[in-house]
Amino acid sequence: MAVDSVNGASNTTNAGNQFVDASQAGFNALTPEDFMLMLITQLQNQDPTQPTSNEELLSQLSMMQSLTSSRDLADTLETLNTTQLNTLATQQLNNAASLIGKSVDGTTQAGLPVNGVVDRAFINEGEVYLGIGETTLPMSLVSGINLAA
């Protein structure tokens, strides 16, 4: 069976007797741990007379975080398609995803104030959450959005 990468007609391809999930091939098969391993390998094998600059390393780490967030969002959206969550949950997740990169204010379920830049949006047990670093903030407890951030 052939894979139509433009139209997405199939997600599998027949490689001999094994079926390979095309969505898990190539770049999509890499995990954050794979990226970290590549970065460490790059550092170990760099030319000592021309070391990688701090800015380049930070750029690579930032790119890795961005790619991971994008993959997580894509995985969440795929889950939405396969489980067919109700329209309200889908709309809430879309609203939460639109806040990625924006600064928000809110209160955690424990009552602690939160202020920071949203780096992910997800659904857990039917409730939509925003991720701000290590903190998770229920979308229902967001009290302010700084659109300039």
Image: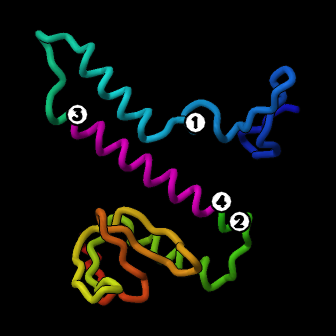
Mark closer to the observer (2, 1): 1
Residue lying furthest front in this view?
110
Few, some or many residues within 10 Å of mark 3 (<14, 14–19, 20+): few
Say if 107 sits above or below 54 in the image. Answer: below
- Which residue is tagged 1? 29
- Which residue is tagged 2? 81
Mark 2 or mark 3: name the one nearer the start of the chain. 3
* Secondary structure beneath label 4: helix
Q: In the figure, is residue 54 to the left or right of 22?
A: left
Mark 3 or mark 1: name the one nearer the start of the chain. 1
- Which residue is tagged 3? 57
Residue 78, numbered circle: 4
Find the distance from the CA under tag 2 to the CA under tag 1: 21 Å
Mark closer to the observer (3, 1): 1
Which amino acid lies under the numbered mark 2 shown in the image of this protein?
Answer: Asn
Q: Quadrant of residue 74?
A: bottom right
Which amino acid lies under the numbered mark 3 shown in the image of this protein?
Answer: Leu
Residue 109 x, y percent position in the rendering: 35, 86
Few, some or many residues within 10 Å of mark 2 (<14, 14–19, 20+): few
Which amino acid lies under the numbered mark 4 shown in the image of this protein?
Answer: Glu
Q: Which residue is at a point 24% across and 79% down the rendered structure image?
A: 114
Circles 4 and 2, Cβ within 8 Å, touching? The answer is: yes
* Secondary structure beneath label 1: helix
Q: Is-magenta flag for residue 74?
A: yes
